[in-house]
Amino acid sequence: MIEVKNIEKSFEGTQVLKGISTTFEKGKTNLIIGQSGSGKTVLLKTLLGIHQSDNGSIAFDGRVYSELSRSEKRNLRTEIGMVFQGSALFDSMTVEENIAFPLRMFTDKSDAEIMQRVNEVINRVNLINANKKKPAEISGGMQKRVAIARAIVNNPKYLFCDEPNSGLDPKTAIVIDNLIQEITHEYGITTVINTHDMNSVLEIGEHIVFLKNGVLAWSGNNKEIIQTDNEDVVDFVYSSELFRMVRDAIRHIGNEKNK
Ligand SMILES: Nc1ncnc2c1ncn2[C@@H]1O[C@H](COP(=O)(O)OP(=O)(O)OP(=O)(O)O)[C@@H](O)[C@H]1O
């Protein structure tokens, strides 16, 4: 669980995060959504310790980040897995070398132990016959699987995903969303996903934080987002005619059931 209390962040006098408080829950897919420029990336980078907040606190299962010693912060970083936008794989390394990388960097496991763990996660994310291939030789969906495998290889407690669906076709995007959600449930990870993708919101939004101009304007889950009349959410999520129709159909079915 990650507890965020009253996070504020300014750049050169412009306040970008204006007192964000929320709890990203363990074993759930927690989504940060909002318009371009609303502060999603700054919030994610602040959670990751890349930006230092001006005010407020972030606690990782009770450990307040700003109160940790340097070595405690280092240890905490080894508990974090990251899926970057565009996968960010090492082009010159094979799939298995990419996945092994965090184990070589952060653990003193033997080669045999590393390969055993690498093969375990390769199986878990269903990467078939790709061990010796380079990223350029596999599809975008498979590259995402490699990125997910690399992010979980060190058994993280926290998984951060920045636009994990970017560049994927809608069907592959949902498969990748579902994989992230399954892994989150299976291993009890606190997963935080920065996304623009409304399919993801409806499919895996177990806890959704909606930012508007650096303010947390709404939070809830994917069922609640369909029911809410919050104007900012409606304006953002249902800017598409298709999503408005989906919402109206779901509401209609709900009303019929309640009759
Ligand atoms: N390092 C920085 N220095 C100055 N301003 C910054 C910095 N990083 C972000 N900002 C500003 O903070 C605001 C929020 O940016 P942020 O990248 O968090 O938006 P976002 O919601 O992630 O947008 P997008 O969906 O387009 O990625 C923007 O106005 C941006 O220009």
Image (cartoon, rainbow, N blue to C red):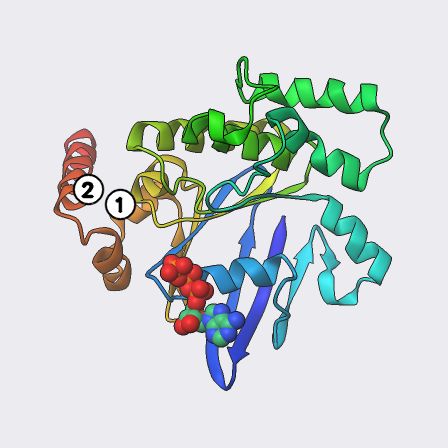
**Residue in the picture at 82% in, 37% down:** 107
Q: Is residue 125 above or below residue 184?
A: above
Q: Is residue 78 left or right of residue 10?
A: right
Residue 250 at x, y percent in the picture: 20, 36
For the view shown, which residue lies furthest in the bottom direction? Answer: 13
Q: Quadrant of residue 217?
A: bottom left
Image-based side of 65 in relation to 137, left or right:
right
The circle drawn on residue 226 is 1
Quadrant assignment for the C terminus: top left
Q: How many marks?
A: 2
Give me the disc on residue 125. Answer: none
| Quarter of image, ligand 1 | bottom left
Q: CA distance from mark 1 to mark 2?
A: 6 Å
What kind of residue is marked 2?
Arg
Q: Element type at marker 2? A: helix
Single out the residue that lies furthest toward the front.
92
The answer to whether mark 1 and mark 2 are in CB contact below 8 A is yes
Q: For the point 73% across and 22% down, which residue is it?
A: 117
Q: Residue 197 vs residue 235: left or right?
A: right
- Who is closer to the viewer here, 216 or 256? 216
Residue under circle 2?
247
- Residue visible at 52% across and 30% down? 135
Q: Residues within 10 Å of mark 2 (few under 14, many from 20)?
A: some
**Depth check, front residue: 259 or 162:** 162
Q: Residues within 10 Å of mark 1 (few under 14, many from 20)?
A: many
Q: Three-letter amino acid code at disc 1?
A: Ile
Q: Pinpoint residue 24: horizontal percent, then vertical percent.
A: 55, 50
Where is 18 relative to 93, above or below? below
- Quick check: 81 left or right of 107? left
